[in-house]
Image: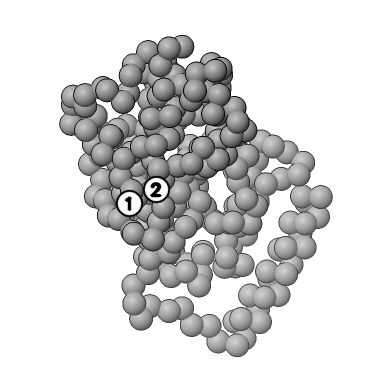
Amino acid sequence: MPQAGKNLKYLRKLRGWTQEEFANKLKIKRSLLGAYEEERAEPRIEVLEIVGNIFKFSLDELLLKDLANQKAGTYLDKRRMLKMGSTVAEIQFVPVKAAAGYLAGFADPDFIDELNTFTLPMLSAGEYRAFEIVGDSMLPTPSGSVIVGERVEALDEIKTSNTYIVISRSEGIVYKRVLKSNRSKNKITLVSDNPQYEPYQVNTEDVLELWQAQMIISKANVQQRWDVNSLASLVNTLQDQVSTLKKKMN
């Protein structure tokens, strides 16, 4: 593996990550990453697969090509290298009208490259995507909000009760809180902030992508208002749902 270690070091520096940060993403010790980069050890295939998923390179490219000296040939190559080297995260935006197309084209670089993009200077380097949501299931987050999420590479990285954009074959694109089951690793529970909506489960094998919510962008002067009776009813419903969920998960 003459190029793998050099490529790991090059890609890490391209993103501006420390060895500690990159090692955490690869689920290995910093010292082991150092050994890879200094070519004192050969990276394991499973580590290279994670690197490939993050940077969208094949194993052959990581193993055989000198990425630092590779000239970007095609338009997509240039776009990919520009995005990886950018210190400001470039965010592709998926509006509601593009949701159906996204389910079919989320893994197609040509489709993703055609999405409109924007940047937010407060976000660190990483892979982000923004999704427009509709409906009242996540109130008080209003319908029409844009959720900016950071890619989650594996289901075991889920932080229970946090909010995510979940893309699945069965449910499409939804914005929910995600709970991991103690009984089954084959299902996750999706919970709405609006307790009028019942929680439901999704098979993990149906999950295509996960994006952990980092920011919510909403229109100014748009605020959901509740009356006291409605709030009391919602609190009671939420308490009942939490009790039921705890019993099921334990």
Q: In terms of secondary structure, where does tag 2 sit?
A: loop
The outermost residue toward the bottom is 228
Q: Position of residue 120 (x, y in %)?
A: 33, 59
Q: Is residue 107 left or right of residue 213?
A: left
Q: Of residues 234 and 167, which is closer to you in this image?
A: 167
Q: Position of residue 98 (x, y in %)?
A: 30, 48
Question: Is residue 49 shown to the viewer in this render?
Answer: no
Q: In terms of secondary structure, where does tag 1 sit?
A: loop
Which residue is label 1 attached to? 88
Q: Is residue 23 left or right of residue 61?
A: right
Separation of marks 2 and 1 at Cα, in angstroms:
6 Å
Q: Which mark is residue 125?
A: 2
Callout 2–callout 1 Cβ contact below 8 Å: yes
From this view, report whether residue 73 is shown above or below residue 188: above
- Which residue is rendered at x = 34% and y = 72% of the image? 219
Q: Position of residue 179 (x, y in %)?
A: 65, 51
What amino acid does circle 2 point to?
Answer: Ala
Disc 1: CA contacts within 10 A as few (<14), some (14-19) or many (>=20): some
- Which residue is rendered at x = 55% and y = 56% of the image? 163
What amino acid does circle 1 point to?
Answer: Val
Q: Position of residue 193 (x, y in %)?
A: 57, 65
Q: Of residues 159 and 235, which is closer to you in this image?
A: 159
Give the image quarter of residue 12: top left
From this view, report whether residue 5 is shown above or below residue 241: above
Instruction: Count every numbered label the image shows and give the total.
Output: 2
